[in-house]
Amino acid sequence: MEKKLKKDKLKIAQGKISELSADHCFSIIFDPRAREQSLDLVADDPKVVLKWTRALTKIIQAMKSVEMQKEHECYLRSQFQSADKKSSGYLLLHEFAELLR
């Protein structure tokens, strides 16, 4: 069933595009554990491909940045919590000094 569906989509794409060239195509590669591992796309012209790939690259970079920030915040929170011996939500001077060592 899936193969037939893909063939039907290809026929539709071929009907709309007179010439299929590599500079009109791009793929989004997903996590290999995902059900669908890639999405192949065809644009009207190479400028559209460039816009899409630049936008997707920026989105991926932003997501990675947010993920790194979250990891950093979790690390800092765990360090703070281990230094906060009385679980008061703030550090006393000696707790802060111990954290810096």
Image (cartoon, helix red, strand yellow):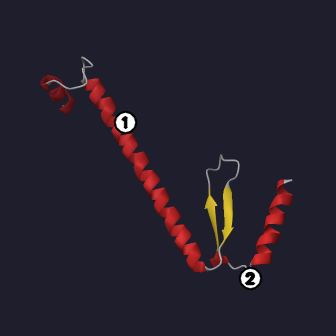
Q: Please state if 33 lies on the left or on the right of 87 as rendered.
A: right
Near mark 2 (Cα within 10 A), the count class, few <14, some 14-19 or many ≥20, is few
Mark 2 and mark 1: Cα distance apart in space: 51 Å
The amino acid type of the residue labelled 1 equals Cys
Residue bearing the label numbered 2: 19
The amino acid type of the residue labelled 2 equals Glu
Please tell me which of labels 2 and 1 falls first in the chain. Answer: 2
Which numbered marker is on residue 74?
1
Looking at the image, which residue sits at the far bottom? 18
- The tally of labels here is 2
Compared with 22, 55 (above or below) is above
The percent position of residue 67, horizontal first and vertical second, equals 43, 46
Q: Determine which quarter of the picture holds residue 75.
A: top left
The percent position of residue 85, horizontal first and vertical second, equals 24, 19
Query: Do the numbered discs 2 and 1 sit on residues whose CB atoms are within 8 Å?
Result: no
Q: Residue at x 67, y 54 (%)?
A: 37
Q: Residue at x 54, y 74 (%)?
A: 50
Q: Secondary structure at mark 1?
A: helix
The percent position of residue 58, horizontal first and vertical second, equals 46, 62
Compared with 41, 24 (above or below) is below
Q: Residue at x 27, y 29 (%)?
A: 80
The percent position of residue 97, horizontal first and vertical second, equals 15, 28
Which quadrant, please, contains the C terminus?
top left
